[in-house]
Amino acid sequence: MCTLNRDCDESAIIREAADLLRAGELVAFPTETVYGLGANALQPSAVAKIFAAKGRPSRNPLIVHVLTTSLARDLVTAWPDTAARLAEAFWPGPLTLVLPRTRAIPDIVTGGSNTVGLRVPAHPVARKIIALADLPIAAPSANRSNAISPTRAEHVLADLKGRIPLIVDGGPTNNVESTVIDLSAGLPRLLRPGPISTDVLKEVLGAEPTMAEGSVPIPEDAPLPSPGQLRVHYAPSTPSVMLPADEADALVAKLSASGKVVARLTSRSTEPCSPMTVALLPHWQDWQERLYDALHMLDELGADIIVVDEPPRNPQWAAVYDRLKRACARGVPW
Ligand code: TXA
Ligand code: MG
């Protein structure tokens, strides 16, 4: 691992990252959402290493990262007006557009689907690496499959140590994963809520995107529409529950009294029962920016349970609600 801002020469580490990518190897790097695990999207043997390092099911498609809208257009067979408007408004940035792919994109990237997810990232380190590699880069979040997405190089190291040759440490990142919108079949469809909320999308599209159904059963051999549709995803290893704040208070009091070690994620300024609390501001932006960092921190405490305040149900909180719902989907074994 190398720290860009402290003990490394930035241009040397970016050169090393680009060289590794061009040689078909994996590199973890920061984006403006979470750390990504990149490979040359045009080389199936390189992309296969992503699935191996993550332990990711092969039918779960990857997002391809490119530097510009025009490079994204080169990889798709259709560029509807909705794509043009969304790209103009939000690229570079945390938005992924799913569109029909050209044959340049190998099957392994898309899990067999005829569409490809494309994103133009904004993070300067990601952009420098992609520019120097001069390749489209397939990059999922740089965590083992089903674990919490990494927002620090240390999180990547803890999860993927020994499995990848380089982690470019660009400091902490601060968001949940990109908003994913499917434009491949008529009306825009939201596959994963993210930093760009539906009310902001509506301003550009003129209407809210339709919602992908969260719990549609997926046939075993079909490509996944989006793992945003898998119930358990992004989960801490500590059993976690999400409850309205008053019920969460009561549960914390009860469990603490029975000797359980309880960790708490809350917006409450005073939290009387649990000493192991991360308190975030009662605003969606603070939760969105600090959610994964907080979950990593709480997970590392080795508590018996993490009790989380349930966020409001509205478009601004949708990405946080979605990630928390999945983080808590395994339930509590006792
Ligand atoms: O912010 C992000 O999107 C981060 C950074 C690294 O860019 N990446 C990320 O990748 O979260 P990953 O693999 O963890 O999630 C990719 C999401 C999944 O929900 C996947 O199903 C969806 O994008 N996706 C990608 N390609 C797709 C496609 N062709 N059709 C439908 N969904 C697709
Ligand atoms: Mg992921």
Image (cartoon, grey):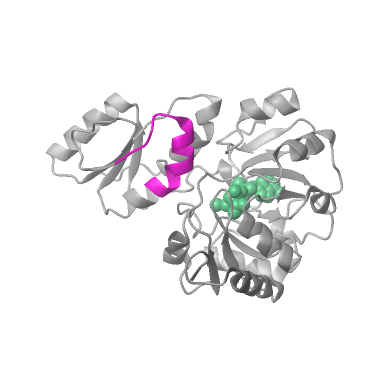
Image position of 263 (left or right of 328):
left
Viewer-side residue, 246 vs 48:
246
**Residue 280, how many percent across, how many down?**
37, 36
- Residue 39 location, x and y as percent? 66, 66
Residue at x 64% of width, y 38% of height? 191
Residue 200 drawn above or below residue 228:
above
Q: Residue at x 39, y 44 (%)?
A: 330
Residue at horizontal 19%, vertical 38%?
255
Residue 219 in percent (x, y) is at 62, 46
Residue at x 78%, y 40% (from the top left corner): 184
Res 185 visible: no
How many discs appear? 0
Q: Which residues are magenta?
A: 278-294
From the viewer's perspective, is 27 left or right of 294? Answer: right
- Verify whether residue 285 appears in magenta: yes
Where in the figure is residue 279, as x and y percent of width and height?
32, 37
Judge from the rendering whether residue 41 lies leftward or rightward of residue 332; answer left or right.
right
- Main secondary structure found in the magenta portion: helix
Q: Which quarter shows the C terminus? A: top left
Residue 225, compared with residue 89, is above or below; it is below
Q: Quadrant of residue 88?
A: top right
245 part of magenta stretch: no
- Asked where in the image residue 308 lies, by quadrant, the reply is top left
- The relative height of residue 192 versus residue 187 in the rendered view (above or below) is below
Q: In this view of the protein, can residue 133 be seen by the observer?
A: yes
